[in-house]
Amino acid sequence: MSTATPTSVTDMKAAFPTPPEHLRVIGTPTLTDFVQILIFIARCAQTHKSTISPNMNLLYVAVPPGVYAHYTREAYPYGMYPYPPRPLDVPNFAGANGGTARENIKIQHALEVKRYTDVQNMNTALIDTFLELMPPSAKIAYNDIRISNPNAVFREMFEWFLNKYGETQAIDRKKNIDSMTAPWSPSDGFDSLIHRLFLANTYAICANHPLQEHQILDAAVIVLQNCGLYPEEMKAWKKRTPAEGNDYAAFKIFWEQAIRIADTAMATPAAQYQYGMNINEVSDENSTTSRTSALENSISTFGSAYAATEERVRNQTDTINNLQGQLTTLQQQLNHSIMARPPMYPPPYNQRNNYYNNNQRGGRGGNQRRQHVPTGPPATQVTPPNPVKRFENMNYCHTHGGDVDDGHTSATCTRPGLYHNYYATRDNTMGGSISGLHKTILPSAVGRPPAPPGGGRSNTPYNRAPSYPTQQQTRPPPPTNPYNNMQPANAYNNMPPPMTAPAYNMPPPMPTPPMPMQQPQYHRAMAMIPPTTPTYQHPTPMMPVPAMPTNPMPQQYYHGYQY
C-alpha cells in the first residue's frame, strides 16, 4: 500500500487492541463507564500514524484538550479539529513549470487527501468501537441520529452520551475529589498515584466540572505528605521556583526520580527478617554447605517464632476464658439484685385534701397553693419513657410536639401557640415543644395499630359546642340517695301514747273604740306639725313653675340611666 493511500475503516479497526470484557456495559451506562471506555478509545486512536502529530498520532480525535494534556506537553492541534482543511478535488497545477513541479504538486495533493480521509475514517472507526461496548438500548437510541449524520465526529457522539447518561450529583463529584487524596503506599508505585489523579481529572472533565491544575497538584502533594516517607524530598520540592518548574508536569518528573532514588537509598536488606524467601545472604553462591546451613538457621528461627506465637495465643485464650467467667458472675449478681429489689409504692393522692390545702385562706399566705408532699417509701426505679409513637408518622409541630396526627405539622397547625413557628421541623425544632420527641419507633414496627385520627394532639380547631346523646346512647341513671331507704327517726317499735292538750278558747272580740277626732280636726293637727324632710309638690295652675338654674350641674350617666 502506498504511503499516500488513505487507510480504510476496516483496516483501522483491525489494528485496534481487543477491548477487555469489563468495559462492556450491562444495563444503564454511568459516567464511570464512559471514563474507562474513553481511555481505551484513546489507545485505539494512537494506533494510526499521521502527519498531524508525529508523537501522538490521531489522539486528538478521541479526547478533549484537558485529557490530551495528560498524555503529552505538546499543544492540542485546534486547527485540525474536527477535520483538517478539505483539499481540492483535483491538484492545482497553476505555476508549475515542468514535469517535476507538477509531480510534486500531485504528491502533495495526495498526502492532503490521505490526511483528511484518515481523520474521517478514524472518527467512524472510533464510533463503531464505542457502540460495540454499549448496551443494545443505548445503541439503538443513537443509531437513529447516526443515520441523519453518517460522517459524525467521535467527540460530538461522546458528548451526546454524556448528556443523556452521564449526569452527576454534587455528592458524586465530592467523592471523586476525595478519591484523589486517598492513602497511598510506595509499594503501589508512583505510576499508580499519577493514574489515580488522571482518572479523577478525566471524570471531572466529562462531568463538565473540570479541575484546575493547582487542585490536582495540591492533591498530589497532600498524598505524599501523608505518606511521611519523603520529608527531605518534600522540602526540596517546596523550594523550587517557577523558573525551575513547579507545575504539575514538573511535579511528575521531579517526584518520579526522587522516589526512585530515595527507595534505593533507604532499601532495607531482606536478610534481617530471617524467614521465608529472605534468608541470609552467603558469600559463596556455589557452596551447597553454606546454603544448607543458612536454610537450617532460617527454619530454626521460624520454629522459635512459631512457638512464641503459640504461647501468646494460649495466654490470650486463658485471658478470654477468665473474662467470660467474670462476665457470667456479674450477670448473675445483676439478676439477683433486680429480683431482690423492694416493691414500689405510688404516692398517695387525696383530691379533697389537696383541694382544701390549695384553696384555704388564712393570714398573709392563706391564698397561696401548698405543694403536695408524697408520703411512703421512695421509688427505687424510674420508668423509662415510652419510645413507641401513637401515630404512623414522624411529623412535628412547634406547639404540640413530635407525636401528632398524620396531617398535623408546624405549617398546617390550626391551633398554634402564642409564639408558634410555622417553619419548625423535627430536625430543627427552633425552640419549640419537645413533647413526644423521644418517641422514634413507629407503631407498625412493634405490631401495634396506630391511634385513630383525633386520638392525640389533633389538628381540629377547639370547639366548645355542647354534645347531646344520640338515639343509640342512653343517659346514665341518677345516683341513688342513701337516705331514701333510711327508717324515720320516730319510727319506733313501741309508739308512745299521743299527747293531749287543753282546748284553746278564743277570747271574745274587742269592741272598736270610737275615733277620738273627726276628719277635719285630723287635717288641722297634721298641718301644725313642721315637715322634717322636703316634700315634692307638683305645680298646679295656681302655683308658679320654679326657674331652672343658670349653671346647671353636669348630668351623670350610669348604665344608660340619667341622674
Image: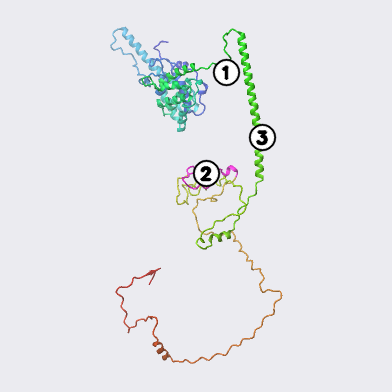
Task: List the residue tagged with mark 1.
Answer: 273
Instruction: Pick the residue in front: 397 or 371.
Output: 371
Residue 300 picture location, percent across and down: 63, 16
User: Magenta segment range?
Assistant: 425-447
Tag 3 and tag 2, C-beta contact below 8 Å: no
Residue 377 picture location, percent across and down: 62, 52
Tell us which disc is closer to us: 3 or 2: 3
Residue 64 picture location, percent across and down: 40, 23
Can you tell which quarter of the image residue 297 is in? top right
Task: List the residue tagged with mark 3.
Answer: 325
Residue 372 picture location, percent across and down: 56, 56
- Residue under the point 56% across and 49% down: 452
Secondary structure of the residue carrying tag 1 is helix
- Residue under the point 63% across and 23% down: 309
Distance Cα–Cα, label 3 vs label 1: 40 Å
Secondary structure of the residue carrying tag 2 is loop
Instruction: Pick the residue in front: 563 or 199.
Output: 563
Q: Amino acid at mark 1?
A: Tyr
For disc 2, the neighbor class at 10 Å (few under 14, some 14 to 19, many from 20) is some
Is residue 319 positioned above or below 344 on the image? above
Instruction: Choose the circle earlier in sequence order: 2 or 1.
Output: 1
Q: What main secondary structure does the magenta stretch of the protein show?
A: loop
Instruction: Pick the residue in front: 285 or 554.
Output: 285
Secondary structure of the residue carrying tag 3 is helix
